[in-house]
Image (spheres, helix red, strand yellow):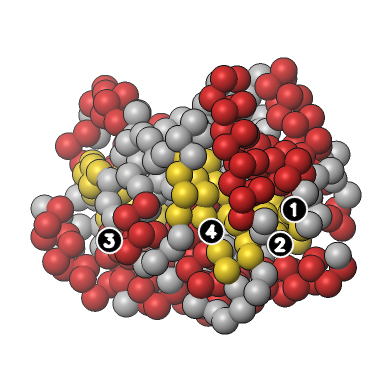
Amino acid sequence: MPKVVHIITRLILGGAQENTLYTVEGFNDREGWETLLVTGPALGPEGELLERAARNGVRLEIVEPMRRAINPFRDVAAYIALKKILKRERPDIVHTHSSKAGILGRAAARAAGVPVVVHTIHGLPFHPYQSRLANRAYILMEKRAARWSDSIVTVCDAMAEKAAAAGVARREKFTTVYSGMEVETFLDAKATRARVRERLRVAPDAPVIGKVARLFSLKGHKYFIEAMPAVLKEFPEAVFLFVGDGLLRERLAAQAREIGVLDRMVFAGLVEPAEVPAMIGAMDVLVHCSLREGLARVLPQALLAGVPVISYDIDGAGEEVVPGQTGWLLRPKEVEGLSSAIVEALRDPEKSRRMAERGRVICRERFTVQAMVDALEALYNRLLSDR
């Protein structure tokens, strides 16, 4: 029975973390596989998935020194701990997720003599919004770690192309496996629309434009807020729903207060993953204006819920949002275009509904957990056979 050890930096509420947990749970439901999930502590304001993992019988091991921030002392300690675990477990495959765990985990797997090493890039660690030195350093680290990988999985084709163009590895080393999600929970998302709006103190007929993301830098909330005044001129009763929490909450509230839109905003705060479908179902339009993201899970989630989407054209967004067909795709940081797209979506709800329905048909097949696990199982079997 092949054993797979998955390693991720932290099991907080987030797309990469859900993807990893669903993968482990999916393999646990299949005969012939043994799994272990190794992670650092779930620190930060984003919430955690540790409780769900334990509740669903996931075999879990926490490496205390493994943290997201770079710290040479902790990083060395985490590497030593990971190598010790891998030598004890003697897995057939190590599958790493996220940047820190990807570097340390692949190095430890190589040192421990693990036969097959796979890494998933959920979001590239190098991007245009960091310093040139940091950008170069991350690329060099990824290139080095790629040599220890038998295969690199990306959650969209766009990331594979970018990584290959940066020289991380040859294009043929990359395989795209779209993130799986609990599709059925989003298909009925609007069933609780009235109840959720009542809980949020939002009028039943108010246009609600929402964003689901941690309140962190590069998530683009500032552009969403900047677009609000123009939307409110056309739809004075509009409400802007922020689902998620983080370090920027006070700063964003101050920005909204300064331009006079704070009273039209609702901060729902941190919600459990099981509540996300209902939150999306309460919206009339979903906006995704992050500046970097591998493949934003919230876009297919909204389309599955029948909610039209507006997104900045970053990374894999264009693989989900086809302009004029399944939503609106805009240049990053574009504020006027963002407000215009929101107004257009609200003015023509029938057009918006048709686009969301087209997106739902595509996403219903592409983003199931079963499809993701099937693709990974085929990859694992091929790599084991090659060995």
Amino acid residing under circle 2: Asp
Mark 2 or 1, nearer chain start: 2
* Residue at image coords 15%, 53%: 200
Amino acid residing under circle 4: Leu
Q: Which residue is mark 4?
A: 36
The Cα atoms of the two marked residues, 1 and 4, are separated by 14 Å
The Cα atoms of the two marked residues, 2 and 1, are separated by 6 Å
* Structural crowding at the residue carrying mark 4, measured as other residues with C-alpha within 10 Å and reported as few (<14), some (14–19) or many (≥20): some
Q: Which mark is residue 249?
A: none
* Depth order, front residue of 7/181: 7
Mark 2 or 4, nearer chain start: 4
- The reply to whether callout 2 and callout 1 are in contact (CB within 8 Å) is yes
* Residue at image coords 72%, 39%: 107
Measured as percent of width and height from the top left, residue 324 is found at 57, 65
Mark 3 or 1, nearer chain start: 1
Mark 2 or 3, nearer chain start: 2
- Mark 2 secondary-structure assignment: loop
The Cα atoms of the two marked residues, 3 and 1, are separated by 39 Å
- The reply to whether callout 3 and callout 1 are in contact (CB within 8 Å) is no
* Residue at image coords 23%, 47%: 268
* Depth order, front residue of 331/66: 66
- Mark 1 secondary-structure assignment: loop
Q: Which residue is mark 3?
A: 275
Measured as percent of width and height from the top left, residue 119 is found at 69, 51
Q: Which residue is mark 1?
A: 114
